Image (tube, rainbow, N blue to C red):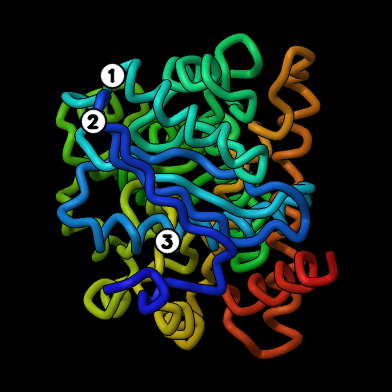
Amino acid sequence: MSVFESPSFDNHEQVVFCRDAASGLRAIIAIHNTSRGFALGGCRMWDYASEEEAITDVLRLSRGMTYKNALADLPWGGGKSVMIGNSKTEKTPEMMQAMGRFVERLGGKYVIAEDVGTCPADMAEMAKESQFVKGIPGEGGDPSPGTAYGVFCGIQASIQERMGKNSLDGIRVAVQGLGHVGYDVADQLKKAGAKLWVSDMNEEALAKAKAELGAEVVGLDEVYDLDVDVYAPCALGATLNDNTIPRLSAKVVAGAANNQLAEDRHGDMLHEMNILYAPDYVINAGGVIHVYHQGPDFDEKATFDHVGRLGNTLLEIYARSKKDGTATHVAADRLAEERFQAA
């Protein structure tokens, strides 16, 4: 299957395949839209089962960055990159430097940052070969706290919209995934008075959440059947699908994971079931806002103030959804398209 034939191809401006034999690098850079400015998006390193799977992921993720940056009101377009390989066993400094050289050759059309499987130390290696790198240690560093705080603010706004409550005290939340972001979200929810149920493959993370947060541990599949107010997917995407949505009793779906809807029509299913869905690329935009503020003059307070405004963006989307009678993911797409098409 060619890139142009992929169902995930959405008039992308440029797709670059990168190969460096010396380091073993195999990567793809996808630039979706640069009407608002250069394309910024993270670099994901993942052990994809096939090249086709990697192409699908980078096309979907780069498109999502165009919409995410527009709704975060950032002067950037959307792009993304993926490196094919196991980040725990195959990653080397030489590979990161090779990736930096490919980014540099694009002359600033794409600016790279960290994502799943990469970290600030990797960005430092890329920065040895390219000036178009964000997330370098000492300049704001890890954006995951920004992502987590944005999700927390988004859950607050969603509870206000769906349940008419200005407090999370006593709100029941199922957090699926306890990575850096998921655990941080759970911690903030606990401090706000929420009751937690958690699910993850990592037994150590589960034990920590039980001991530190008083969370109730549930099975990987059991999480969809819980009697909770909020289902917060904070791990892999496509957890909202034909199998899981009919099992949900939650009033709100709001979490950090990317591409939560297996297909767009699953957003319509949630709407029909009167489950309020916080579009993933809106609620998890705190990370890219954090990246926007990174630099030698990084201001943490200004950064988190900016991230906190994501709650207001969600409330605007919910108001549009009610006014137009559309699902929230459709309302979010339309608002984003207005912004980047106008540019």
- Is any part of residue 192 visible from this angle? no
| Residue that mark 1 sits on | 92
Quarter of the image with the N terminus is bottom left
Q: Identify the element where label 2 is drawn.
A: loop
Q: Is residue 23 above or below residue 146?
A: above
Q: Which residue is at a point 50% across and 48% down the rendered structure image?
A: 80
* Mark before the other along the chain sequence, 1 or 3: 1
* Mark before the other along the chain sequence, 1 or 2: 2
Q: Which amino acid does label 3 sit on?
A: Asn
Which of these two is toward me, 13 or 306?
A: 13
Choose mark 1 or mark 2, whichever is in front.
Answer: 2
Res 170 label: none
Question: In the rendered image, which quarter is residue 231 located in?
Answer: bottom left
Image location of residue 138, percent across then percent down: 61, 9
Q: Which amino acid does label 1 sit on?
A: Thr
| Residue that mark 2 sits on | 24
Image location of residue 110, percent across then percent down: 60, 43
Q: Which residue reaches farthest top?
A: 138
Choose mark 2 or mark 3, whichever is in front.
Answer: 2
Q: Identify the element where label 3 is drawn.
A: loop
* Mark before the other along the chain sequence, 2 or 3: 2
Q: Which residue reaches farthest right?
A: 342
Q: Is residue 60 above or below residue 205?
A: below
Q: Is residue 101 above or below residue 120?
A: below
Image location of residue 22, percent across then percent down: 25, 24
What is the tally of numbered marks visible in this picture?
A: 3
Quarter of the image with the C terminus is bottom right
| Residue that mark 3 sits on | 259
